[in-house]
Image (cartoon, rainbow, N blue to C red):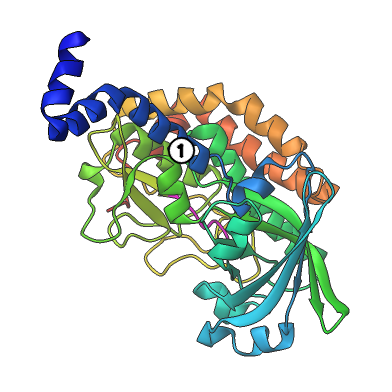
Amino acid sequence: MDMTLNLMHKFPALSIVLWYISMAPFLQAQNTEIGRAGDAFPSLFECFLQTSDSLPQLKINTDWGQLIRTKEAEAYQPAVMSFYKQDGTLVELDVKVRARGNARKKVCQFPPIKVKAAKQQLKALGYGPENKLKLVLPCQAGKMHEDCLLREALAYQLYELIDSIHVKTKIIALQCWQNGIEKHSFNAFLVEDKEAMTSRLNGRLLSQGKIRVTSLERWLYLKICFFQYMIANTDWSVASRHNLQFLQLPGYQRVVAVPYDFDYAGLVNTSYAIPGSTIPIEDVSQRYFQGKNVTEQEARECSQFFLSRKEQVLQYCQSMNLLRARSMDSVHQYLVDFFDLLEEEERMIKTFVNAPGGE
C-alpha cells in the first residue's frame, strides 16, 4: 500500500491508472447493477402476461371504421389505449394502431392489429423499451368466431406444455371504442413479438437464408411435427419459412424452429380455413402428417413423449372455461382421438414412420 502511494505521488498521471485499477471491481459491479435495474422494467406485454387477473381488460379508442376500411394499406392511425395496473391505477397511452397479417386481413372483418406506443411515454410510466403489441381479434362478430379465436389461443398455450421454447400469449377482454361510444367488445389475445421472444431466449433471429429440415434441431423438429398433427395444422413449412420462426439459441448447435399462427388448424376450425393445394386432404379437420424421414425409433420416442403429456393437455383444455361447453367438448374429443392413435402401435407406426410430405 505504501509503495502504491509513493508511485502515485511521484507520477501523478499514473495515479489515475492505479485508481481505476483499484476501483475496477466496484465499477464493474455498479455497471452490472445498473444493467439489472434496466432489465427490471417490464414491457407492456410482460405486464399483461404477469397480471393476476386471468382476463385483463384493454380499451382501444380509435376510428375503428377507418381501420377496417383501410386494413389492406396497413397504415398507422392515432388511438388511445387504456388499462388498469395491478394496483388499480388507470394508464392511458397515446398510441398508433394499424392492421397486420396476411390471409386474415383479406377474409376477416377484424384484422389482427399492431399497437405502437412512444418509448419516452413508456419510460416515464416505468415500462421497458419494447413498444409494440400484437393483437389477434375474432375474424367476425359473434360467439362462433370468438370460440375460434379462443381455440387458437389454446393451441399456442398447448404448445407451451410441449416445449419451453415457444411464443407467449395472453387472452384479454378487448373494448373497442370510437368517439366516446363502445363499438365492439370481445375476447382477443396478445402475441409475443418475435424480437421480444428472441431477446427473452437470449438468441439470434434468423430472418433470412434457406433453412432445411436437416439443419434443424431434430428432437424439437419432431415435436413440432407431432404437435401440428395433434391440432391438425398443415399451414406451415420449413422450406418456405411459413409460420415458423428460426433461431440460434445458447445450448443448441443446430437451428431451433418455433411455430406460430394456428388459425388454419382443424382444432381451431375457422370458417375460412382450407387445406393447401399440395396437401392431400379435403378439409382442415382431417389430420395429415408432414414430418420428413421419421424413423420408427423417433416415432416411438415422440409418441411416448406426447403420451406423457396426455393428462396435462386434456386437463388444460378442460380449464379453458371461456369456451362454450359444446366447443370445449369438441376440442377434448378431438385431442383424445390423437392420443388414442398414439396408443395403438400399428396405427402409430403407419401414420408417422417414413410418412409422405415434408420438405
Which residue is situated farthest in the front direction here? 10
Quadrant assignment, res 86: top right
Name the kind of residue labelled 1 in the image: Ile
Quadrant assignment, res 224: top left
- The percent position of residue 348, horizontal first and vertical second, equals 45, 32
Residue shown at the point (82%, 52%) measured from the top left: 89
**Relative to 31, does residue 232 appear above or below in the rendering?**
below
- The percent position of residue 68, horizontal first and vertical second, equals 66, 84
Quadrant in which the N terminus appears: top left
Residue 267 visible from this viewpoint: no
Which residue is situated farthest in the top direction here? 2
Residue 272 versus residue 34: which sits nearer the camera?
34
Residue shown at the point (22%, 34%) measured from the top left: 253
Residue shown at the point (21%, 43%) measured from the top left: 214
Q: Is residue 79 left or right of residue 285?
A: right
**Relative to 8, does residue 60 appear above or below in the rendering?**
below
Q: How many circles with numbers are drawn on the protein?
A: 1
**Relative to 238, does residue 30 appear above or below in the rendering?**
above
Residue 215 versus residue 277: which sits nearer the camera?
215
State the SS at label 1.
helix
- The percent position of residue 171, horizontal first and vertical second, equals 70, 51
Q: Give the residues drawn in magenta, as a range.
A: 259-263
**Residue position marked by numbered label 1 in the rendering:** 34
